[in-house]
Image (tube, helix red, strand yellow):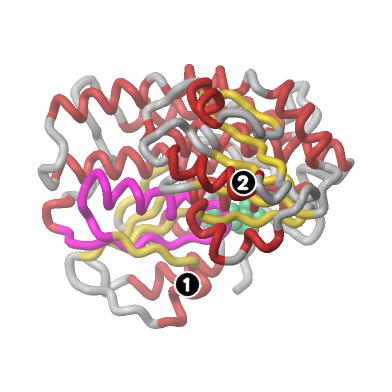
């Protein structure tokens, strides 16, 4: 069926707004009354020692987030690679490794080449895809659909959060299989997951302030994104979105790495967007923010009410999200990252759905 903008100004705006609905669809597809059900033939993590996650672009940042989940929740070592590097590095693929490829389109040439390299070497080849009739899906042993529905905007939004949800469910399954998550703890995590679409609706309600802030961001030449832990890949994704559609130079760093170089760039002209829920690492991030503020840098803090209060004075602007389980924060905080990039691009008058030089799916290496 033809997909239209349903009254939105751009497909990207529609796809951002659809996230609570498509996330619900993804949850319905994988969660049962009592637990997690994967499509056939499933995956038994008791027989696996290692995981290799490979993708490009936004899907790669989903993999990078998932590494934090698989390692901390399931104690499963994970390697992540961008597909164009993975294939030609000729990496060893030990037995008992599952190779997992993440791709919205399922047609990205680099990712497909990496998949073909793994066939016959990995214990199992799995794919997290949106388009289930794609080449990557066809050539995989296990297909995990993300249920995002057709995504038209070149800059990926709802596919990213649906990829994250499916990868998180997989990490919970791995934790359960490997004996690192009791039934009660799993049940608690699934309740939190079920509450995510509702929290996303609250996050979408920051659109007005996000759009007002974006008018200020649109005047910047460079923007820096910071995050710690699983919020670091999200900072990278926020910077990618900003570059792709607003054409503003945006970079992301792990908050703790700021002092090892990028702090040299800080002055009053560079907005620094800090993605930091009030979690166990928050105090460390506050000291990083003070390093920026001491040099005249302008901090835009994306956090919850407690985080904004604890950050104290001196923060330039803030965007307040609801409190969320720390392990779900990268998914919820994707929404303000998308909204900031979208409204900055709108303020600049760029072609949001069809940014220059980019393609939705890149089928050449
Ligand atoms: C292109 C798109 C990106 C996307 C990447 C990977 O660069 O512009 O939005 O993240 O390809 O695409 P895939 O379909 O493999 O997820």
Q: Secondary structure at mark 1?
A: helix
Q: Main secondary structure of the magenta part?
A: helix
Q: For this rendering, which residue is in front, 75 or 295? A: 295
Taking the view exactly as shown, the residue that stands out farthest to the front is 294
Q: Earlier in the sequence, mark 2 or mark 1?
A: 1
Mark carried by residue 63: none
Residue 316, compared with residue 365, is above or below; it is above
Residue at x 36%, y 58% (from the top left corner)? 100
Q: Which class describes the residues within 10 Å of circle 2: few (<14), some (14-19), or many (20+)?
A: many
- Taking the spot 16% from the left edge, 37% from the top edge, the residue there is 181
Task: Name the secondary structure under disc 2.
Answer: helix
x, y percent for residue 108: 56, 62
Name the mark nearer the viewer: 2 or 1.
2
Q: Quadrant of ligand 1?
A: bottom right
Residue highlighted by disc 2: 238
Can residue 248 be seen by looking at this rendering?
yes
Q: Is residue 17 left or right of residue 230?
A: right
Image check: 359 left or right of 125?
right
Quadrant in which the C terminus appears = bottom right
For mark 1, what is the residue?
Answer: 113
């Amino acid at each position: 069926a033809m997909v239209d903008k349903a009254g939105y100004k751009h497909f990207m705006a529609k796809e951002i707004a659809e996230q609570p609905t498509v996330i619900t669809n993804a949850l319905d597809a994988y969660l049962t009354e009592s637990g997690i059900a994967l499509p056939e033939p499933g995956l038994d993590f008791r027989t696996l020692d290692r995981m290799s996650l490979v993708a490009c672009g936004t899907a790669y940042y989903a993999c990078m987030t998932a590494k934090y989940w698989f390692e901390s929740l399931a104690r499963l070592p994970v390697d992540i690679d961008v597909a164009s590097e993975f294939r030609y590095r000729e990496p060893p693929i030990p037995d008992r490794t599952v190779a997992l490829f993440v791709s919205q389109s399922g047609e990205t040439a680099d990712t497909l080449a990496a998949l073909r390299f793994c066939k016959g070497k990995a214990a199992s080849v799995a794919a997290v895809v949106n388009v289930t009739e794609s080449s990557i899906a066809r050539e995989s042993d296990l297909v995990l659909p993300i249920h995002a529905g057709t995504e038209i905007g070149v800059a990926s939004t709802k596919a990213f959060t649906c990829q994250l949800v499916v990868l998180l469910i997989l990490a919970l399954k791995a934790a359960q299989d490997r004996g690192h998550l009791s039934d009660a703890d799993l049940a608690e995590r699934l309740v939190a997951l079920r509450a995510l679409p509702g929290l996303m609706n609250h996050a979408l309600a920051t659109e007005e302030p996000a759009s007002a802030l974006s008018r200020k961001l649109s005047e910047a030449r460079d923007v820096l994104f910071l995050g710690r832990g699983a919020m670091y890949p999200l900072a990278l994704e926020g910077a990618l979105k900003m570059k792709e559609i607003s054409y503003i130079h945006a970079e992301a760093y792990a908050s703790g790495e700021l002092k090892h170089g990028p702090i040299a760039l800080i002055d009053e002209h560079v907005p620094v967007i800090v993605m930091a829920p009030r979690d166990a690492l928050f105090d460390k991030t506050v000291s990083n923010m003070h390093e920026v503020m001491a040099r005249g840098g302008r901090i835009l803090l994306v956090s919850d009410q407690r985080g904004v209060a604890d950050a104290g004075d001196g923060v330039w602007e803030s965007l307040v999200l609801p409190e969320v389980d720390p392990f779900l924060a990268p998914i919820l905080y994707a929404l303000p990252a998308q909204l900031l990039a979208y409204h900055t691009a709108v303020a600049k008058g760029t072609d949001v759905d069809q940014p220059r030089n980019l393609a939705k799916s890149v089928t050449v290496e």
